[in-house]
Amino acid sequence: MTTEEHTTTGVIDAQTLARYKAAGFGGSGSRGRRPALLIIDVQYRTTGTRRMPFDEAVKEFTTSCGDVAWDAVGNIARLLAEFRAAQWPVLYPYVAPKRSYDAGQLGVKVPGIMTIPEKGYEFVEDVAPAPQDVLIPKRQPSAFFGTSLVSYLVDLGVDSVVVTGCTTSGCVRASVVDAFSYNFAVSVPSDAVYDRSPVVHEVNLFDMSQKYAEVATTDDVLASLRRLRSDDAA
């Protein structure tokens, strides 16, 4: 997502834009040649079992993000179809059901996560894993922390990741920062990630685009992926 797009939304103020520019942030990075798709926490506990406004969705699961989640799911499905067609790796980092013994600080900060019914932990059917996909159970926000994700990516010959799912400010951001720290090229489709707050969503997209990732629309990311497929076929 470009600086200009953020300016038109009115979320990022002129002073912030000027300070980031003065600091020299926001350069264009590589998108890599061998991408993997990460679909993070796209479970019914974050979307609800059907499209609902936020105020209704949180009555089903307190951790639901409401209808914005379903908007993103539609775009994730488009990206997933492209990765399937190209036979590129797809990995699903997801929060495993929480038990009393592993509440930790996350359970303290977000107590609602400790009482989610089993249905909430199921993958959303529209973008559910296929048998060849890799499932990465995690117990902390980052898909990398305490998991074998890096090992899988190395084994698959991956040099870049397209990060989708939720929340933009939480597990997505934590995973993006760690992927960047491991020197993977990172892309974030701005409309294929979601959060419960539009302001928090936009601010985190802006900051990630300035420091850690190439942030663009799903349409733009798909165009880049199709060019890559075309180059590989040539």
Image (cartoon, rainbow, N blue to C red):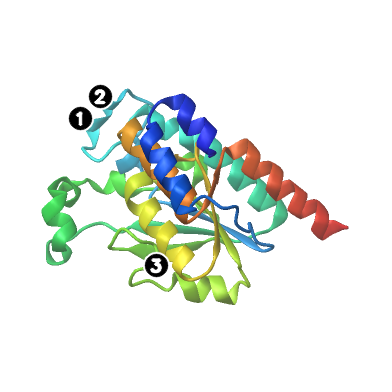
Residue at position x 58%, y 76% in the image: 155
Give the CA separation, mark 1 to mark 2: 5 Å
Q: Secondary structure at mark 2?
A: helix
**Is 199 situated left or right of 149 in this image?**
left
Q: CA distance from mark 2 to mark 3?
A: 32 Å
Query: Nearer the observer, disc 2 or disc 3?
Result: 3
Identity of the residue furthest to the right in this view:
234
Query: In screen coordinates, is 221 left or right of 99?
Result: right
On screen, residue 228 above or below 191? below
The residue where tag 2 is placed is: 56
Question: Looking at the image, can residue 165 be seen?
Answer: no
Mark 1 in CB contact with mark 2 (< 8 angstroms)? yes
How crowded pointer 2 is (Cα within 10 Å; few <14, some 14-19, many 20+) is rated as: some
Q: Amino acid at mark 2?
A: Glu
Q: Which residue bears the numbered disc 1?
A: 59
Q: Is residue 5 above or below residue 106?
A: above
- Circle 1: element type: helix
Question: How many neighbours does mark 1 have within 10 angstroms: few (below 14), some (14-19), or many (20 or more)?
Answer: few
Corner quadrant of residue 198 = top left
Question: What's the residue type where badge 1 is placed?
Answer: Lys
Q: Residue at x 46, y 55 (%)?
A: 211
Give the distance between the C-alpha atoms of the residues marked 1 and 3, in whole angstroms. Answer: 31 Å
- What percent of the width, then of the height, locates residue 31? 63, 56
Q: Residue furthest front?
A: 22
Where is residue 12 drawn, in percent x and y?
39, 34
Question: Can residue 4 be seen from the camera position used here?
Answer: yes
Q: Earlier in the sequence, mark 1 or mark 3?
A: 1
Q: Which residue is mark 3?
A: 144
Image quarter hosting the C terminus: bottom right
